Image (tube, coloured by chain):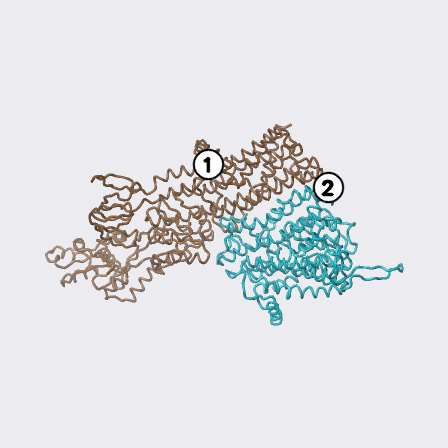
Chain colours: A brown, B cyan
């Protein structure tokens, strides 16, 4: 870290930036506080060179003026340096993120030949060939060929859609079979990294609401102090004090909130940078700020709270059967199901060392594919194949026969085709009636109550039992959500599961509220509903149907693997596509606001000590009564002024690490955080400068007579 | 004994403010008051006469405009009375000069009551009674109405801030008039005169005869204290035995000054949460306590003080009077100790401990908003007030309110010196004592306080015009800005969310008090050091 920091300090561009930012024109627009300090620098410098400007208000020696001027300009430079430093760090991070940004390679047709190009370089009218399994680089129309295109990630429709010549296709969708030539019809969208670069570069960086409010407040305080110091000059003069313009300016600079005024830009950029370090690309500053305010998080169950892959964890037989029976049936029904769920059923059966004796039949059986009408899958085999196999008879009799294998055998013998199917309880009940329905329902509910999803298995019209599938919680999600809850954020889990299952998972994962049996549109409704109640809502999403909700949410974190529409709508994109990162985002948002608040409080608290350092220095010579205020007992009026200014200046670089790293955030009650920070930055802000100024004064006194 | 008197004042004013706080809350949300039917009829009559639709609701701009228009008309009337009192009935006196008339009109319409004239010598009974006493109802009623509208901004959603004319009428008829009537009776009983004669002639012990100015003192006195006005019938204000005859009347007047300002946080508590109201009240009392402690930390007098009241009675009265921006005085400011004067300055700088009728409460809320914004970010959330986010515009307006005050005090003070007007009144050689007097004059004008060192000696065109404009700016600019804050809050959704920093409880009271103190001290510390501190 130390070497890294060193490297960036000697980054030439950064040093150059820190100097160009000294331009009064730039400062007057961006930082009124620093602009005033710079005006002070020019003024004091002018007095230093032309001490005869005013006999009345110029009483110190020339060296003092030059020293003061140097300290003033260094103060300004410290501020611009902090800004340039954080910008340069963020720039470096952007460069490294560029590699992570999803770049689709496209096979562009140039004179009939395929040339590999970046999708961003494509222009309207270009033709590209897309093969099966490849992603369509951008919106266009089919120019040649026919293919099925998987549009599930865009439309939610799980069945591939048939496309032929002149049909429109969407960028980001996947060609399922064959290959097609597509003519590009849309311009390249702005890359979201480009948007982030805009947030880093000072010229383009828009201020967030809190930053604006803070800047106004700081400007207001500055105007008050200008009025105070300006009128002091006159009152002092009429009261017979020997007033000195540079000392007054020193007082002004000391009083003005230079610390926060100088560090404000750096803090903002550092927030973006810290998110980038977590591979999160921020597209608007508003998003980060809202993250801190976020008090409702809408989380998808699948992928965020759970691994998103359900596994079989138990076989539950009906009363007439044994575990062995249901395991055999489940094995058979899942044999041709190569989904994660299907294989997990086989695995569970293997674990239990159960294998159906009619394995041959299963292997040669006709798979029954899952379809949206029947919502069932499994296998089907007809008894014909059975006829000639006589060995089977032997093996069969040698094995202890389960009820299921017996049933299968019986069915085969009576020449009835055997269907072994699995599916949701409702779906199975439509085809299988031979069951004690209350028992089935009760058992299914028991599974749900434990957070599982029941799948029923039937052999022809008889239901054998249930498979309990369960989604496993993500590692650490419990503790992460506990932290979220402690910080006063309500979590809402959205899931398509039924109420009971959802409740169980919610309880296990520390979720406050659930939205069970939710449709994709419910997300948007929930976001709007919560916002109307006054909550600041954060959510994650990856599908196109998430886009409206992502756009509406105050903090929308899109997954990089998600669709372009989602990434477009969200104000942040996670390049790692880890949904649970939304929790990090909230933490960082809070840290950002806390850092601003802490340094503001510190800055204002510092003023108390500065008054006690400079006022006696200004007035003591002419008014012995002011001796009482001289609690700091500084070496001389000159050293008092200089040490206050030096302290004022070096506080800025001292706080650069804090501004870049952010105030430590611990999940706890806001009240607790408040008291703690008030102690550190409020009370500490009052006490610390007394010690700091005194220490600098002791050092200076060595060099002064 | 002193402790007993202090307790009587505090318990008395707090006890009464509990009653009146509830009543104010009812008035703010138009709940039923005692005698509602009869009162309603009387008020409806008024609305008819002035042609007001009592159901019409005003935006913050309309409300502010109504305040300004009403006040301009009232001030114009008062100015005319003062200019032409020579041709008006009841012991006519020569008309005032234009600048003094303007200053006095501005002074009374802004609830300041800075007096650059000697009442018993320069004003006719007509001017005092019809002009000043009338204005002593108009000014506080306007301030209280503004605070009503301000508080409604946090309760109502997009329903306007109320109707100024309705509030104004109701405040005068059902709040100020009844209380001041009964307190005038009590003051009469305690020995304050009430007559339309301008003088009484009495035989002295030596056998000669003496003419003593007199008039409708009790009527003026009660509203003078109740309405945080402070302008005395006599030049000597409440140190005159006719205005404040005994120790008991002294205590009673203290209570009268404190009661309405202290009722506001209680009303606020009824409407926006008990804890919040009590916390605001606590912060106000802490500030008032600091002022009192400063005043009592050093013996005042004996020169310039009434022996009837002594150091304690004078300090208690003066601190109560300055704290509530009443500006009545039962002792000469020059007789008060420097520490007591620092206490006075503190009260005028903050303007909210507890501040004048209505405006003190508004100012305290502005301090709450500023405090919440300054330290609130530290919990990692955008600061909220009443669960509504504080946006840049609120901060801008609040910062303006906070900024106007030092600007109105310091810049004119410099002008008084650079134009030699300060020197011509206070002497060529500027000392901390004379600087204090100049600073005090403008602080008093800007805070709409009214107490001052200079008195008739400041009856010069410069002082009359400058303080008049400062009083006007110091009154209407903050009220306008504060109503704008309320106007923007009233457009926001009422939220069901928890505030990130609770605006009640010990922690909040502590932080608010410290922030009020620090913000004020940072602004004015050097001037207190150069002024009263160096005396």
Q: Which residue, given by chain and number where applicable, does mark 2 sit on?
A: B431
B49 above or below A275? below
Give the camera-side residue of B463 and B207: B463
Residue B437 to residue A701: above or below: below
Q: Chain of mark 2?
A: B
B450 relative to A509 in the view: left or right: right
Specify the farthest residue to the right: B207
Q: Secondary structure at mark 2?
A: loop
Is residue A304 something that shows in the picture? yes
Q: Quadrant of the N terminus of chain A?
A: top left
Residue B1 seen in the current view: no
Disc 1 versus disc 2: nearer the observer: 2
Protein chain holding label 1? A
Compared across the picture, whether A264 is left or right of A492 comes to right
Q: Which residue is mark 1?
A: A85
Who is closer to the viewer here, B288 or B181? Answer: B181
Q: Which residue occupies the extreme front position in the image?
A: B87
Q: Which sits in the foreground, B20 or B281?
A: B20
Image quadrant in which you'd find residue A405: bottom left
Q: From the viewer's perspective, is B213 left or right of A599?
A: right
* Secondary structure under the numbered disc 1 in the rendered image: helix
Q: Residues within 10 Å of mark 2 (few under 14, many from 20)?
A: some
Question: Residue B529, image x and y in percent?
Answer: 68, 42
């Amino acid at each position: 870290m130390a070497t890294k920091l060193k490297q960036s300090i000697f980054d030439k561009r950064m040093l150059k930036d820190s100097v160009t930012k000294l331009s009064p024109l730039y400062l007057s627009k961006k930082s009124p506080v620093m602009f005033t300090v710079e005006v002070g620098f020019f003024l004091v410098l002018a007095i230093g060179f032309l001490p005869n400007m005013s006999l009345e208000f110029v009483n110190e020696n020339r060296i003092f003026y030059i020293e003061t001027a140097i300290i003033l300009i260094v103060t300004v430079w410290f501020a611009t340096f902090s800004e340039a430093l954080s910008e340069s760090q963020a720039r470096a991070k952007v460069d490294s993120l560029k590699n992570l940004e999803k770049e689709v390679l496209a096979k562009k047709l140039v004179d009939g030949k395929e040339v590999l190009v970046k999708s961003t370089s494509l222009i309207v009218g270009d033709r590209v060939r897309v093969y099966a399994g490849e992603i369509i680089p951008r919106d266009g129309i089919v120019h040649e060929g026919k293919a099925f295109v998987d549009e599930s990630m865009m439309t939610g429709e799980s069945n591939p859609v048939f496309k032929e010549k002149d049909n429109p296709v969407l960028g980001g969708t996947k060609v399922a079979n064959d290959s097609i030539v597509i003519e590009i019809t849309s311009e390249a969208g702005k890359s979201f990294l480009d948007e982030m670069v805009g947030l880093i570069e000072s010229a383009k960086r828009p201020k967030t609401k809190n930053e604006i409010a803070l800047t106004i407040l700081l400007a207001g305080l500055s105007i008050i102090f200008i009025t105070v110091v300006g009128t002091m000059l006159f009152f002092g003069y009429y009261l017979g004090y020997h007033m000195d313009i540079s000392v007054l300016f020193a007082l002004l600079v000391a009083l003005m909130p230079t610390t926060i005024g100088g560090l404000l830009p750096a803090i903002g950029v550092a927030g973006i940078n810290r998110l980038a370090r977590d591979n999160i690309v921020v597209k608007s500053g508003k998003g980060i700020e809202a993250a801190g305010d976020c008090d409702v998080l809408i989380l998808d169950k699948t992928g965020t709270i759970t691994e998103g892959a359900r596994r079989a964890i138990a076989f539950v037989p009906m009363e007439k059967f044994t575990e062995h029976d249901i395991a055999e049936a489940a094995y058979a029904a899942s044999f041709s199901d190569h989904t994660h769920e299907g294989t997990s059923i086989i695995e569970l059966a293997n674990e239990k060392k159960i294998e159906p004796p009619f394995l041959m039949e299963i292997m040669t059986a006709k798979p029954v594919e899952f379809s949206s009408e029947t919502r069932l899958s499994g296998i089907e085999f007809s008894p014909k194949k059975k006829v000639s196999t006589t060995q089977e008879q032997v093996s069969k009799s040698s094995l202890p026969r389960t009820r299921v294998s017996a049933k299968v055998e019986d069915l085969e013998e009576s020449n009835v085709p055997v269907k072994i199917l699995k599916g949701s309880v409702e779906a199975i009940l439509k085809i299988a009636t031979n069951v004690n329905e209350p028992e089935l329902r009760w058992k299914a509910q028991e599974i749900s109550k434990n957070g599982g999803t029941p799948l029923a298995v039937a052999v022809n019209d008889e239901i054998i039992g249930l498979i309990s599938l369960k989604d496993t919680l993500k590692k650490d999600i419990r503790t992460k959500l506990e932290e979220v809850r402690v910080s006063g954020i309500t979590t809402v889990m959205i899931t398509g599961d039924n109420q009971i299952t959802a409740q169980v998972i919610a309880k296990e994962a520390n979720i406050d509220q659930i939205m069970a049996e939710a449709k994709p549109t419910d997300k948007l409704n929930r976001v709007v509903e919560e916002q109307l109640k006054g909550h600041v809502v954060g959510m994650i999403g990856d599908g196109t149907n998430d886009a409206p909700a992502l756009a509406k949410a105050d903090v929308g974190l899109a997954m990089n693997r998600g669709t372009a529409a989602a990434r477009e709508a969200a104000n942040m994109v996670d390049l790692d596509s880890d949904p649970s990162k939304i929790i990090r985002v909230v933490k960082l948002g809070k840290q950002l606001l806390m850092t601003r608040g802490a340094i503001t409080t510190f800055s204002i608290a510092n003023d108390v000590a500065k008054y006690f350092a400079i006022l006696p220095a200004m007035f003591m010579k002419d008014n012995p009564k002011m001796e009482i205020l001289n609690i700091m007992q500084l070496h001389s009026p000159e050293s008092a002024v200089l040490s206050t200014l030096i302290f004022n200046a070096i506080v800025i670089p001292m706080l650069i690490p804090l501004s870049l790293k952010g105030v430590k955030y611990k999940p706890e009650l806001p009240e607790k955080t408040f008291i703690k920070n008030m102690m550190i930055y409020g009370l500490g802000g009052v006490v610390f400068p007394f010690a700091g100024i005194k220490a600098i004064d002791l050092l200076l006194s060595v060099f002064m007579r | 004994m002193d402790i007993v008197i202090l307790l009587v004042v505090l318990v008395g004013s707090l006890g009464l403010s509990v009653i009146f706080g509830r009543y104010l809350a009812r008035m703010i949300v138009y709940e039923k008051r005692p005698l509602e039917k009869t009162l309603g009829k009387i008020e409806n009559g008024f609305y008819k006469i002035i042609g007001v639709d009592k159901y019409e609701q005003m935006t913050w701009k309309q409300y502010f405009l109504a305040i300004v228009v009403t006040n301009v008309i009232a001030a114009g009337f008062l100015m005319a009375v003062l200019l032409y009192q020579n041709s008006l009935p009841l012991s006519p006196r020569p008309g005032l000069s234009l600048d003094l008339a303007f200053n006095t009109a501005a002074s009374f319409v802004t609830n300041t009551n800075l007096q650059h004239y000697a009442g018993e010598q320069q004003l006719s009974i007509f001017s005092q009674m019809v002009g000043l006493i009338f204005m002593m109802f108009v000014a506080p009623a306007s301030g209280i109405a503004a605070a009503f509208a301000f508080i409604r901004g946090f309760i109502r959603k997009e329903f306007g801030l109320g109707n100024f004319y309705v509030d104004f009428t109701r405040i005068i008829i059902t709040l100020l008039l009844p209380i001041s009537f009964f307190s005038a009776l009590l003051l009469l009983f305690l020995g304050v005169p009430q007559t339309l004669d301008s003088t009484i002639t009495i035989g002295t012990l030596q056998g000669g005869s003496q003419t003593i100015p007199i008039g409708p003192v009790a009527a003026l006195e009660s509203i003078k204290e109740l309405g945080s006005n402070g302008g005395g019938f006599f030049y000597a204000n409440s140190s005159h035995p006719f205005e404040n005859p005994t120790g008991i009347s002294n205590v009673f007047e203290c209570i009268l000054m404190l009661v309405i300002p202290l009722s506001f946080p209680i009303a606020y508590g009824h409407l926006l949460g008990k804890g919040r109201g009590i916390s605001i009240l606590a912060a106000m009392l802490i500030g008032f306590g600091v002022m009192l402690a400063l005043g009592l930390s050093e013996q005042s007098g004996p020169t310039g003080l009434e022996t009837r009241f002594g150091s304690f009675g004078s300090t208690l009265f003066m601190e109560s009077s300055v704290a509530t921006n009443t500006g009545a005085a039962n002792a000469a400011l020059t007789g008060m100790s420097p520490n007591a004067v620092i206490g006075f300055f503190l009260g005028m700088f903050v303007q909210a401990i507890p501040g004048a009728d209505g405006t003190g409460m508004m100012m305290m809320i502005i301090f709450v908003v500023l405090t919440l914004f300054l330290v609130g970010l530290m919990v990692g959330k955008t600061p909220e007030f009443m669960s509504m986010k504080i946006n840049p515009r609120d901060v801008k307006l609040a910062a303006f309110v906070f900024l106007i005050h030092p600007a109105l005090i310091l810049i004119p003070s410099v002008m008084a010196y650079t134009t030699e007007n300060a020197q011509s009144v206070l002497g060529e050689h500027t000392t901390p004592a004379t600087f204090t007097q100049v600073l005090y004059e403008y602080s008093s004008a800007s805070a709409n306080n009214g107490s001052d060192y200079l008195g008739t000696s400041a009856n010069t065109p410069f002082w009359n015009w400058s303080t008049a404009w400062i009083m006007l700016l110091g009154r209407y600019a903050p009220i306008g800005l504060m109503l704008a804050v309320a106007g923007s809050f009233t457009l926001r959704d009422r939220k069901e969310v928890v505030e990130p920093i609770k605006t009640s409880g010990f922690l909040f009271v502590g932080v608010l008090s410290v922030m009020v103190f620090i913000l004020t001290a940072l602004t004015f510390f050097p001037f207190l050091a150069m002024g009263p501190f160096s005396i």
